[in-house]
Amino acid sequence: MYKVGVIGGSGFETLISEGVRKRDLDRYGSIDYTLGYVKGIETVFIPRHGFKHEYPPHKIPFKAMINLLNKLDIDRVIGISAVGSLREDLPPGSIAIPIQLIDYTIRRDTFYEDHPIHVDVSRPYCRALIKILLDKAEELGIKVEYGLTYVATEGPRFETPSEIRMFKVLGGDLVGMTNIPEAILAREAGMHYALITLVTNYAAGMQDLIDMDEVYRISKMRERDIFRLVEESIPVISSSELDDECIRFRGRFREVSR
Ligand SMILES: [Zn+2]
């Protein structure tokens, strides 16, 4: 059985039973996390924005976060994020799993600062983990949209309506502020990583289509579905043999992060 990592909003900490809060400090920064169990599987939960929501998107210690998972010998990681939707047929409350990523940030986080290494991100998310999540969602009767493109923006501001129109032209479906560099660093570190997103709003310029109280109510309801999906998937993620595609750079990463 393999350990599993979950990176998400602090509300998801309650996934973990017998949880112990810990802090890790290394050359990449300090990270608070919870170590415990989900359905008997040893699981680490990292609140992406800190337990006190102290890190805005551009201040999240992403490298420390991924390196912590590495040090704990975890290479199976599920991210959970709130996103905006660029599509009218993807309303607030939708649960969506992206398969592609567009980087519209100015972040340059990499573990290979001083090494001529170019990781392959032809498929930025782990196909095997996505399949496990989709199969489990189907089994649980949870509707999940799949095959989407996530556009990562710098934040902390939201996008302008013109930017949103541009992202639509570029093929974007979802917009958020954190999956760059999270997904890329996970790949650099040789991890299997997939992202589950919850659409909490339409992107700028589409907002007048919705009633915010309704959005809040739907989001709360769907958060419980995501919780259930992650909780039920963890034992499968832990016990499955996964592809080798995501872990090609692990050896190099271990050399540079030593
Ligand atoms: Zn994989």
Image (spheres, rainbow, N blue to C red):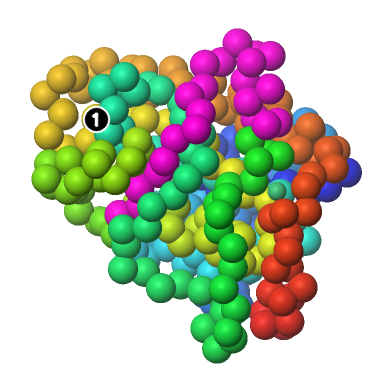
Question: In the image, is residue 31 above or below residue 15?
Answer: below
Identify which residue is drawn at 60% across, 55% down: 33
Residue depicted at 34% across the width and 23% down the height: 90
The residue type indicated by label 1 comes to: Tyr
Is residue 131 something one can see in this rendering?
Answer: yes
- Tell me if mark 1 has few (under 14), some (14-19) or many (20+) residues whose alpha carbon lies within 10 angstroms of its own: many
As drawn, 150 above or below 188: above
Residue nearest the viewer, comparing 254 with 26? 254
- Left or right relative to 3: residue 223: left
Q: Position of residue 231 (x, y in %)?
A: 67, 29
Quarter of the image for residue 22 reads bottom right
What is the residue that sits farthest to the right in this orientation?
1
Secondary structure, mark 1, is strand
Q: Is residue 138 magenta?
A: yes
Q: Is 21 in front, or is 243?
A: 243
Lateral position of residue 241 relative to residue 205, left or right? right
Quick check: is the Cβ at mark 1 less than 8 Å away from ligand 1? no
- Which residue in the structure is indicated by mark 1? 202
Using the image as rendered, state which of residue 254 and residue 10 is in the foreground: 254
Q: Quadrant of residue 249?
A: bottom right
Q: Is residue 31 above or below residue 160?
A: below
**Residue 184: within the magenta?**
no
Q: Residue at x 44, y 35 (%)?
A: 148
Q: Is residue 180 left or right of residue 17?
A: left
Residue occupying image coordinates x 51% and y 28% = 146
| Magenta-colored span | 131-153
In the rendered view of the protein, which quadrant contains the N terminus? top right
Image quadrant assignment for residue 74:
bottom right
Viewer can see residue 9: no
